Amino acid sequence: MVPPGNILFLLLLPVAAAQMTPGSCSGCGPLFLPLLAGLVAADAVVSQLIVVVVFVCVRPRSRPTQEDGRIYINMPGRG
């Protein structure tokens, strides 16, 4: 299912593609293999960086130990 905000984009995409003239892109040809490999490698590195950052931010942090054995209610960070 497509989110509601993207439906308009998907509907207008063929209209925008039809209005582009075939020769409007100068220098748009097939990519050389080393350039394509470099782009794929850079994309993989950035994707892994995003995964690592999300993993570090989401993992649970260690809770401080309670020295006095009491259970504190309505005191954030104490129990």
Image (spheres, rainbow, N blue to C red):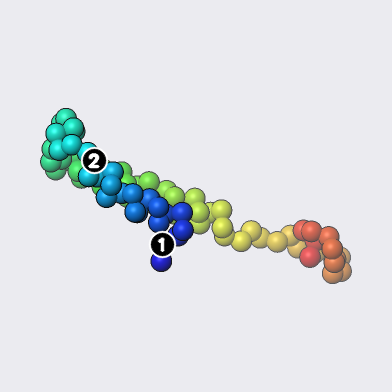
Between 20 and 61, which is closer to the camera in this rendering? 20
Q: Position of residue 23 (x, y in %)?
A: 14, 34
Image quadrant holding the C terminus, namely bottom right
Q: Position of residue 35 (x, y in %)?
A: 19, 39
At 79% from the left and 59% from the top, the residue drawn is 76
Which type of secondary structure does the marked residue at label 1 adopt? loop
Residue, disc 1: 2
Q: Distance between the residues labelled 1 and 2?
A: 25 Å
Q: Which amino acid does label 2 sit on?
A: Gln
The answer to whether the residue labelled 1 contacts the one labelled 2, judged by CB atoms less than 8 Å apart, is: no
Quarter of the image where one finds residue 42: top left
Which type of secondary structure does the marked residue at label 2 adopt? helix
* Front: mark 1 or 2: 2
**In the depicted structure, whether residue 33 falls above or below residue 63:** above
Residue count near mark 2 (Cα–Cα under 10 Å), binned few <14, some 14–19, many ≥20 = few
At 61% from the left and 61% from the top, the residue drawn is 60
Image quadrant holding the N terminus, namely bottom left
Horizontally, residue 58 falls left or right of residue 13, namely: right
Q: Looking at the rendered structure, which numbered label has been put on residue 77?
A: none
Return the disc, 1 or 2, that comes first in the chain's sequence. 1
One can see residue 28 in this view: no
Between 62 and 1, which is closer to the camera in this rendering? 1
Residue, disc 2: 19
At 34% from the left and 54% from the top, the residue drawn is 11
